[in-house]
Image (cartoon, rainbow, N blue to C red):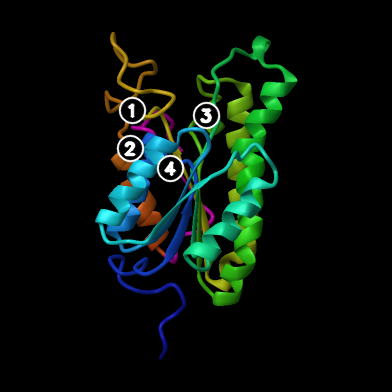
């Protein structure tokens, strides 16, 4: 009996694949990039306005023996997702893994959220992941293998601390995961999300705040980028896991 598509050892399930990872210059992006490289994945790393960190991550990936392409593009521009996919395919080959990690999250109370901020946030956090998935899914279906992972947020469930624009964008992203997952599962393509709570060493939270937690997190501390990366690789390696948004929040929101 032949093995089902997507089967294999977790240690080798991703080896030799090509991944497109957006938001590679942030703390979570760097951690996910290195974890995927250690799993044997070649990487296209994207950044918007911070080239030095992204290029630094690219060099780290090369030192791990993987091929890498570093691409710039503003995901608020509707033309960028298609361009990033095309460049990845030109430089590295077909995209087997999409990690939609890039996000926008300017903190505002609801009274201060104007139309421009609302539209800009949803363009990056929701429209861009949709356009990326729309661009890579046909090839994944044709080849019978694909992994799509979206970085959501606990704010999709709790409202969070950033603002209504951010919470709404992440709730919409969860809906996008569920939509694509049900339609691609039979073709060997899994679609999942990870919803972290507050993570240190990121653009939103460079370091743990003095004076305690901003929220009563049961484990008593904030999350770390490598913990997100460890979960990302586990999710991407599992061909039987799909249509899930996995909370990674230290027990903040039981579900």
Tell which circle, 1 or 3, labels the residue nearer the N-terminal end. 3
Q: Residue furthest right?
A: 115
- Name the residue that disc number 2 marks: 225
Contact (Cβ within 8 Å) of mark 3 with mark 4: no
Mark 3 secondary-structure assignment: helix
At 59% from the left edge and 27% from the top edge, which residue is drawn?
A: 166
What distance separates the C-alpha of mark 3 from that of mark 4?
A: 22 Å
Contact (Cβ within 8 Å) of mark 3 with mark 2: no
For residue 200, the mark is 1
Tell which circle, 3 or 2, labels the residue nearer the N-terminal end. 3
What distance separates the C-alpha of mark 3 from that of mark 2?
A: 18 Å
Q: Is residue 127 left or right of 36 when viewed as pictured?
A: right
For residue 155, the mark is 3
Q: Residues within 10 Å of mark 1 (few under 14, many from 20)?
A: some
Mark 2 secondary-structure assignment: helix
**Mark 4 or mark 1: which is in front?**
4
Nearest the viewer among 236 and 29 is: 29
User: Does the magenta portion include 240?
Assistant: yes
Contact (Cβ within 8 Å) of mark 1 with mark 2: yes
Tell which circle, 4 or 1, labels the residue nearer the N-terminal end. 4
Can residue 178 be seen here?
A: no
Can residue 236 be seen here?
A: yes
Q: Residues within 10 Å of mark 4 (few under 14, many from 20)?
A: many
- Name the residue that disc number 4 marks: 24
Q: Residues within 10 Å of mark 3 (few under 14, many from 20)?
A: many
Nearest the viewer among 149 and 83 is: 83
Q: Which residues are magenta?
A: 239-255
At 58% from the left edge and 72% from the top edge, which residue is drawn?
A: 187
Q: Residues within 10 Å of mark 2 (few under 14, many from 20)?
A: some
Tell which circle, 3 or 4, labels the residue nearer the N-terminal end. 4
What distance separates the C-alpha of mark 1 from that of mark 2?
A: 7 Å
The percent position of residue 76, horizontal first and vertical second, equals 64, 36
């Amino acid at each position: 009996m032949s093995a089902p598509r997507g089967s294999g050892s977790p240690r080798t399930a991703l080896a030799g694949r090509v991944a497109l990872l957006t938001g590679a210059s942030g703390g979570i992006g760097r951690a996910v990039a290195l974890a995927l490289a250690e799993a044997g994945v070649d990487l296209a790393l994207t950044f918007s306005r911070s080239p030095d960190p992204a290029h630094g991550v690219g060099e780290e990936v090369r030192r791990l023996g993987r091929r890498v392409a570093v691409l710039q593009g503003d995901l608020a521009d509707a033309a960028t997702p298609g361009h990033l996919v095309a460049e990845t395919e030109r430089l590295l080959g077909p995209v087997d893994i999409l990690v939609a990690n890039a996000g926008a999250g300017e903190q505002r109370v609801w009274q201060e959220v104007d139309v421009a901020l609302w539209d800009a946030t949803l363009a990056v956090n929701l429209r861009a992941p949709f356009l990326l998935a729309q661009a890579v899914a046909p090839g994944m279906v044709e080849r019978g293998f694909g992994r799509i992972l979206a970085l959501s947020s606990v704010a999709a469930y709790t409202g969070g601390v950033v603002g209504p624009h951010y919470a709404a964008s992440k709730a919409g992203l969860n809906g996008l995961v569920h939509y694509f997952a049900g339609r691609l599962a039979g073709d060997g393509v899994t679609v999942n999300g990870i919803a972290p709570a507050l993570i240190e060493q990121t653009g939103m939270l460079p370091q743990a705040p003095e004076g305690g937690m901003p929220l009563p997190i049961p484990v008593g501390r904030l999350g770390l980028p490598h913990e997100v990366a460890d979960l990302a690789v586990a999710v991407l390696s599992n061909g039987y896991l799909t249509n899930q948004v996995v909370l990674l929040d230290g027990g903040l929101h039981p579900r």
